Image (cartoon, helix red, strand yellow):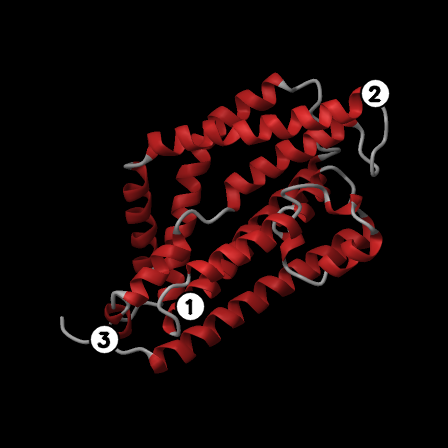
Amino acid sequence: MGKYFHVLSIGVQNTLVYRMNFLFRAAFGLIPLAGTLFVWKAIYADKGPEADIGGYTLAQMISYYLLVTLVDALTAVAEDDWQIAADIREGQISQFLLKPIDYLTYRLCLYLSGRTIYTIFASIPVAIFILILRNYFVGAADWLTLGCFLLSTFLAGILQFFIAYSMAMLAFWVLDVSTFIFIQFAFEYLASGHLFPLDILPAGVARAIQFTPYPYLLFFPVGVYLGRIQGTDLWAGFAIQAAWVFGGWLLCRWLWSRGVRKYSAFGG
């Protein structure tokens, strides 16, 4: 395990080089969020702040998007999928085939270190934004709810990484994986609850989306925090989220084992 702690340390040091980039990226990333909140405030304007749209009051809807932004900052992959695909395409993975280090664990350590540093710097503008909108922000009901939210967010981050890793593994078979990554991102943006809460969709559409892993990236953690997912639905949701994480790990392992059989590198 010592070598992986060393990878975490190196990842933190490398990521700190871009700390100002992270700060500005997080700050300017709030501009689309502000636009979205203005749209919803306009929708609620004629109905009153206590109006109910899809089961959400104005305060709950604003809290939903603020939490989506927070969870996204904690879990989103930055350039991990592109870097993994580049490692395969350029033959950099050859060293991992010759050394006693697991590539999946290596990349997961880099992802965790990158998310840790990004979260520290991104928390500054996000906290300021939440402070400005504090009158609309709904707090967690209790400590248990907050703990469940943090656990579901952690699982969402691992699942997010496994999805990105799986997409990058396609580089073993195709020269350019960008098309597949963009298609996957489009599905994720819609089906994860990033664009709108999934429970305001028609029941049939929302039910169909639940058969994909995407709701467990954003919608589920946010729903847990807001108290919209409770009781048996909460524990069933955790079981499904954990199952998707385990399934993602199995898929990553299977794609790697199949890919290295096809892989070849020349020169040195």
Which part of the image, by quadrant, shows the C terminus?
bottom left
Residue 160 picture location, percent across and down = 53, 54
The residue that disc 3 covers is: 265
When asked about the image quadrant of residue 20, the answer is: top left
Residue 129 placement, left or right of 9:
right
Where is residue 186? Give x, y as percent: 57, 52
Q: Tag 3: Cα neighbours inside 10 Å, few (<14), some, or many (≥20)? A: few
Q: Looking at this rendering, what residue extends furthest in the left direction?
A: 268
Whichever of labels 1 and 2 marks the residue nearer the N terminus, that label is 2
Indicate the quadrant containing the N terminus: top left, top right, bottom left or bottom right. Answer: bottom left
Q: Is residue 115 left or right of residue 93?
A: right
Which type of secondary structure does the marked residue at label 3 adopt?
loop
Foreground tag (3 vs 2): 2
User: Residue drawn 73% across and 32% down?
Assistant: 61
Quadrant hosting residue 127: top right
Q: Report the amino acid beneath label 2.
A: Asp
Question: Tag 1: residue type?
Answer: Met
The residue closer to the viewer here, 181 or 110, is 181
**Between 119 and 25, the one nearer to me in the picture:** 25
Say whether disc 3 or disc 2 marks the residue closer to the N-terminus.
Answer: 2
Mark number for residue 46? 2
Image coords of residue 17 (percent x, y): 28, 37
Q: Is residue 139 visible?
A: no
Nearer the observer: mark 1 or 2; the answer is 2
First along the sequence among labels 3 and 1: 1
Q: Under tag 2, what secondary structure?
A: loop
Q: Is residue 48 above or below residue 181?
A: above
> What numbered label is drawn on residue 169?
1
